[in-house]
Image (cartoon, grey):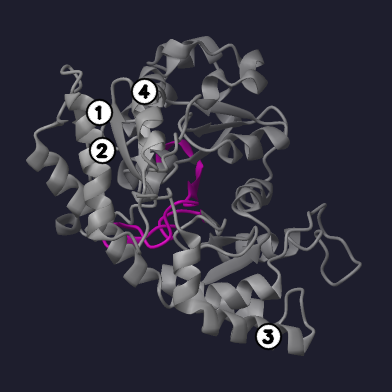
Amino acid sequence: MNIPLIDLQAQYDSIKTEVKIAVDSVMESQHFIMGSYVKEFEKEVGEYCGSDFAFGCASGSDALLLALMAIDLKPGDYVITSPFTFFATAGAIARLGAIPIFIDIEADSFNLDPIKVKAFLEGKAKLSKRINPDPQKIKAIIPVHLYGQMADMDPILELADEFNLKVIEDAAQSIGSKYKGIQAGNLSDFGCFSFFPSKNLGAYGDAGLITVKDKELADKVNILRLHGAKPKYHHKYVGINSRLDAIQAAILSVKLKYLDGWSSSRKSIADDYNHLFLKSGIASKDLSDTNAILLPNETTGTEKNGGRHIYHQYTICVKDRDGLQKWLKERGIGTSIYYPVPLHIQECFSELNYSPEDCPVSLKVSQQALSLPIYPELNQDQIEYVVSSICDFYNT
């Protein structure tokens, strides 16, 4: 049996006719940059997220950059974020000459730990004493809603209010996730989304979106993504070229209608995985037993608390992760490691002088995390084959 990590062809086959009609309509219009298709998608996705202001852009990476530009982040400023995320989160900070402050994650959710953020801001953490930043230069917090589950936002927002910080949600993996009944990207100053093809809502190329709460900042973002010009050729700011093209917008409008159904299917598949792993006896609450795996933990994503985990990834933690990955590959099962090297010890940030032990949970998870196949079209036989293959590895 051959089971890829994600099967985009299966998804395309189910919506092929609608996508072709949408693309053909753009081709017939000959309006490829901005225009009515982009405006319509922005309206639809803004309503979906519950945001009054939503702007398409070239990528999720650019969405983060636009948010930081909108708050006038300057060289030498600081932004707090997670080290256990895709590079773009910290890359956007560094591109503006600012300095990322890496605060460790929670062991159960893999998201930014508000308790550790609080200790840092209050000067009680070892890291805060070593970095010793000017409090006036700490400008923002970027929590990452990793794997499709939102970070614990209430304490983060309280800290932001207390220390006068902007909050930028990195929701690249979490469109449709909920925290206490509120959609990702609609709890803070900005929400930054990626429509990279493998995302739950994926374009057929690079694409992104930013939601903004404040009208003045929204107007600024709208100008910044168009080279900072308003009107055309009259430049209010030094902006960037970050536009969502009409073909991608038309495709995303088709796919948005199916998003909640796809997310529900992912949740059902995750539940099936959990049930089978628990039934097998190899699931555990810790890894003291080498023949055990840690299952994903729904924290803010529990439905009884108004949360929603959309399972962009189904990620387990295991001992001998690399051995298991090799074993599964030999049996035709696709997997991936998100992320093998935490950002605080990446070579490009070596001048910040972090040691691996500054973020011990991130370091540990980076050595144990393995993402398994999950996509709406995954069937029961495939799920059972993945689980039985993992059981065979630990029982051999």
Q: Residue furthest right?
A: 233
Q: Comparing marks 3 and 2, which lies closer to the viewer?
A: 2
First in sequence: mark 2 vs mark 4 = 4
Structural crowding at the residue carrying mark 2, measured as other residues with C-alpha within 10 Å and reported as few (<14), some (14–19) or many (≥20) = some
Q: Inspect the image, locate mark 3, and give the three-letter code of the amino acid beneath it.
A: Asp
Say above or below: 57 vs 64.
Answer: below
First in sequence: mark 3 vs mark 2 = 3
Q: Comparing marks 3 and 4, which lies closer to the viewer?
A: 4
Tag 3–tag 1 contact (CB < 8 Å): no
Structural crowding at the residue carrying mark 4, measured as other residues with C-alpha within 10 Å and reported as few (<14), some (14–19) or many (≥20) = few
Residue at image mark 2: 389
Q: Which residues are magenta?
A: 162-190
Give the Cα separation between the discs numbered 3 and 2.
Answer: 44 Å
Inspect this view and state whether residue 143 appears: yes
Residue at image mark 4: 323
Q: Give the structural element (helix, strand or loop) at label 4.
A: helix
Residue at image mark 1: 393
Residue 344 position within the rendered picture, expressed as x and y whole percent measured from the top left: 53, 21
Q: Inspect the image, locate mark 1, and give the three-letter code of the amino acid beneath it.
A: Phe
Structural crowding at the residue carrying mark 1, measured as other residues with C-alpha within 10 Å and reported as few (<14), some (14–19) or many (≥20) = few
First in sequence: mark 1 vs mark 4 = 4
Residue at image mark 3: 24
- 128 relative to 156 in the view: left or right: right
Say above or below: 58 vs 73.
Answer: below
Tag 1–tag 4 contact (CB < 8 Å): yes
- 353 relative to 339 in the view: left or right: right
Give the Cα separation between the discs numbered 2 and 4.
Answer: 13 Å
| Residue occupying the point 78% across, 63% down | 226
Tag 1–tag 2 contact (CB < 8 Å): yes
Residue 253 position within the rendered picture, expressed as x and y whole percent measured from the top left: 53, 77
Could you say which disc has been placed on residue 69 in the image? Answer: none
